[in-house]
Image (tube, grey):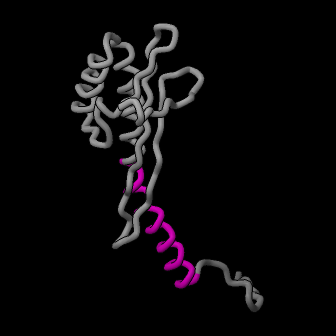
Amino acid sequence: MFRNKQYSVGAERGMSLTGLIGGLAVLGVAGVFGMKLVPAYLEYSTIKAAIVKAKEAGGTVREMQTAFDRNAGVNDVEAIRGRDLIITRDNGEPDISFAYEKRVPLAGNVSLLIDFAGTTDPSGVVAERNLAAQ
């Protein structure tokens, strides 16, 4: 009827309070990073989609910039505007590129700087703005 259970010394299993607090601290830091960085990457993906739509709209450089601004206004993009786009024409086909930096404040005077760049060029090469020509 009665079973004798034998326990060996040091065979206890489970998580200590210190381990639990440490694990929760790591999860908290990861959560804060996620909450701060996810909006920046969502905005980046929205910009990439907007340049594809602007390229599909076609027309002159100004018309593509206006199409981008319309789409960016609807999707609440604040990082760049249509005038910041680099629009090149190779073989009559327009390609739109962009590059920008996003500074994400983490805590106090600590922030994270992320470089974003994208293009509609099939080769994936982001065009550089020629500052001497402006």
Q: Over which residues does the magenta segment extend?
A: 16-39
| Of 11 and 87, the residue lying toward us | 87
User: Quick one: which residue is furthest to the front in this view?
Assistant: 132
Determine the image quadrant of residue 49. Answer: top left
Predominant secondary structure in magenta?
A: helix
In percent of the image, x 42 and y 30: which residue is there?
Answer: 48
In percent of the image, x 38 and y 65: which residue is there?
Answer: 106
Give the tally of numbered discs. 0
Determine the image quadrant of residue 78. Answer: top left
In percent of the image, x 49 and y 79: which residue is there?
Answer: 21
Residue 127 locus on image (x, y percent): 50, 29
The N terminus lies in quadrant = bottom right
Determine the image quadrant of residue 3. Answer: bottom right
The C terminus lies in quadrant = top left
Residue 79 locus on image (x, y percent): 32, 43
Magenta includes 17? Answer: yes
In percent of the image, x 30 and y 25: which residue is there?
Answer: 68
Magenta includes 99? Answer: no
In the figure, 59 relative to 118: above or below? above
| Of 100 and 110, the residue lying toward us | 100
In the figure, 84 relative to 26: above or below? above
Q: Is residue 60 left or right of residue 95?
A: left
Q: Is residue 79 left or right of residue 13?
A: left
| Of 14 and 59, the residue lying toward us | 59
User: Quick one: which residue is furthest to the top in this view?
Assistant: 92
Residue 9 locus on image (x, y percent): 75, 91
Residue 132 locus on image (x, y percent): 41, 34
